[in-house]
Amino acid sequence: MSYIILLAVSLGPGLAWLWFFYRQDRFAPEPRALVTKSFVAGMLAVLPAALVELPFRGFITNPGSLWGLALASVFFIGLPEEGIKYLAVRREVYEHPEFDEPVDGIIYSIGVGLGFAALENLFYALSFGISIAPLRALVACLAHASFSGVLGYYLGLAKFNPDRERAFLIQGLTIAILLHAVYDLFILSPQLPGYISLVVLGSAYLFIRAKIRETRILEH
């Protein structure tokens, strides 16, 4: 397998989605260098997330019951992945002067989410073959972007409402974790209808799309 092709089908979709979301912020787009930095930070977040998940991989693949899988989805998938993406946003851009309006939280968090998805796609392609790339390009990238975008919305609220910062941060992280967990639960469980995961994904995407538009209407 050509490594150039492998990189293209793994990283390319993440960059394409990043451009798509970046273009949604038409009135005052963020500096491309900082958005790119967010994307790279998301890629770097994959390793610590994988290290946290690794000891529990057996429990995720063989949970023993539906309730066990639900708990694994929350604590061993949603929590480490969304938690580490949250830390990446906080570390790299939250205090940056260019994070100067609430909608920026969505854009930068989406950047981190798509960077995470891009490198994750590469590992999946290496493990399961390049044939898995198209599905992950469409679904997995959008899922990471959407769940991180929901978190980013609350990060924007937190930054510009200092009296409620802690509450908004906890709320956003909790919602992102639960969305991610429910999404994975319906994918992983043969007992549950898998299409519900697409409903969860679609709802998260429509939420952040509406919030980007709403913010821009209020600001302009």
Image (tube, helix red, strand yellow):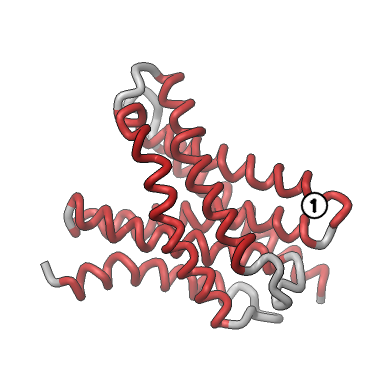
Q: Residue at x 71, y 72 (%)?
A: 99
Task: From the viewer's side, name the closer residue of 80 and 188.
Answer: 80
Residue reaching furthest to the top: 65
Crowd band around label 1 with a 10 angstrom C-alpha radius: few (<14), some (14–19), many (20+): some
Q: Which residue is mark 1?
A: 165
Horizontal side of residue 101 vs 125, given as left or right? right
- Which type of secondary structure does the marked residue at label 1 adopt? helix
Which quadrant is home to the N terminus?
Answer: bottom left
Residue 208 position within the rendered picture, expressed as x and y whole percent measured from the top left: 63, 57
- In the rendered view, tell whether residue 109 sits above or below residue 188: below
Task: From the viewer's side, name the closer residue of 173 and 84.
Answer: 84
Q: Residue at x 85, y 57 (%)?
A: 161
Residue reaching furthest to the left: 1
- In the rendered view, tell whether residue 73 sits above or below residue 66: below
Residue 15 position within the rendered picture, expressed as x and y whole percent measured from the top left: 42, 72
Q: Residue at x 21, y 68 (%)?
A: 6
Instruction: Give the residue type at disc 1.
Output: Glu
Could you say which quadrant of the image residue 120 lies in?
A: bottom left
Horizontal side of residue 210 vs 201, given as left or right? right
- In the rendered view, tell whether residue 70 sits above or below residue 197: above
